[in-house]
Amino acid sequence: MATFSVQAQPTDAASWTELARTVEAAGFDALFAADHPGSCASPFVALAAAAAVTSRLGLGSYVSNAGVREPILLAADVATLDVVSGGRARLGVGAGHTPAEWRAVGRERPDVAGRVRRCVEVAEAVRALLAGDEVTVDTGDLTTYAARLDRPRPVQDRIPLTVGASNSTLLRWAARHADVVGLAGFGRTLPDGHQHTVRWRADQIEAQLAHVAAGAAGRETPPVLEALVQHVAVTDDAEAAAAGTAAAGTAAETGLTPAEVLATPFVLAGTPDEIVSAVAGHRRRWGVTRFVVRAGAVDALAPLLPRLAGKELDFEHTRK
């Protein structure tokens, strides 16, 4: 099966709650909210509003910047969301990339190694707090003393953890400890602090998956692989859609051909049959079984969800 979720940001109450209802009714697995303090809505406030108008939809930040989030506050937000949603919260974390977010809390963005160390320490601390443990950490990257999450206690015994990563060290850690490894296809952060180059070439994807495989070695149940889809186009001319993506923005710097763009799990373009076939192909080739799309793709993909989640993919898998 292929599972699809939606990442979105609220701009007003009516459209946000309507989106939540639509996403749930269409059969998407979860609604995720971005977490960039100062440039988008507070994810947990938005997700609590979505919880109030849904009953089955998973809900989580995608993903929280561990560099500027303190473990006790993040744990309290996630636990509260789990309570008000009746046990539907997801925990999503990443190392963060936007320098302005560090400066806004009085810090300078560390180097990559420092960001990864803090992300791991925050993820471990939040998980321990959600489990009911007392947490003390005193390193150069994180400080917290005798933290406990006495109330509220989450509904779920164990809230699923997604780690968004492209760094080799973080990919290995996520593969050992997370439920879901989120692949975004991001390369270096550009000077604006928000945009990225992309790592969409086959050899780059294979290199990331090699780190995941190494980290997951010995796990009885390996993590699920999830791709953040940057572009969706239901069209009779997939090559033209892919050519536009290849020529646009940071993707142009990779020199990818349209065929190479269509081979990545970060772009879904083509007729309904071609998209269904591509999703089956991404599962076969990369092991990706979960996809997160932007809100703008909901209407186009909703009619395809039964096929994307159904027996046709199983048939494709066994046939090939």
Image (spheres, rainbow, N blue to C red):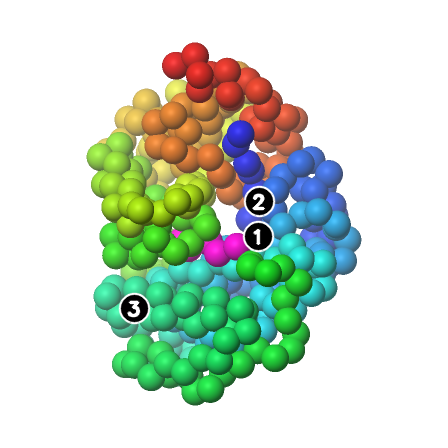
Tag 1 or tag 2, which sits nearer the N-term?
Answer: 2
Instruction: Kindly identify which residue carries mark 3.
Output: 117
The three-letter amino acid code for the residue at tag 3 is Arg
Instruction: Tell me how far mark 3 sits from mark 2, CA to CA.
Output: 28 Å
- State left or right for residue 131 relative to residue 80: left
Name which of mark 3 and mark 1 comes first in the sequence. 1
**Res. 140 in view:** yes
| Magenta stretch: includes residue 14 | no
Element on which disc 1 rests: strand
Q: Quadrant of residue 139?
A: bottom left
Assign the C terminus to one quadrant of the image: top left
* Left or right of residue 133, residue 22 in this image: right
Q: Nearer the viewer, mark 3 or mark 1?
A: 3
Q: Which residue is mark 2?
A: 6
Work out whether residue 250 or residue 114 is closer to the camera in this orientation and state it: 114
Image location of residue 88, percent across then percent down: 65, 55
Q: Is residue 265 above or below residue 127?
A: above
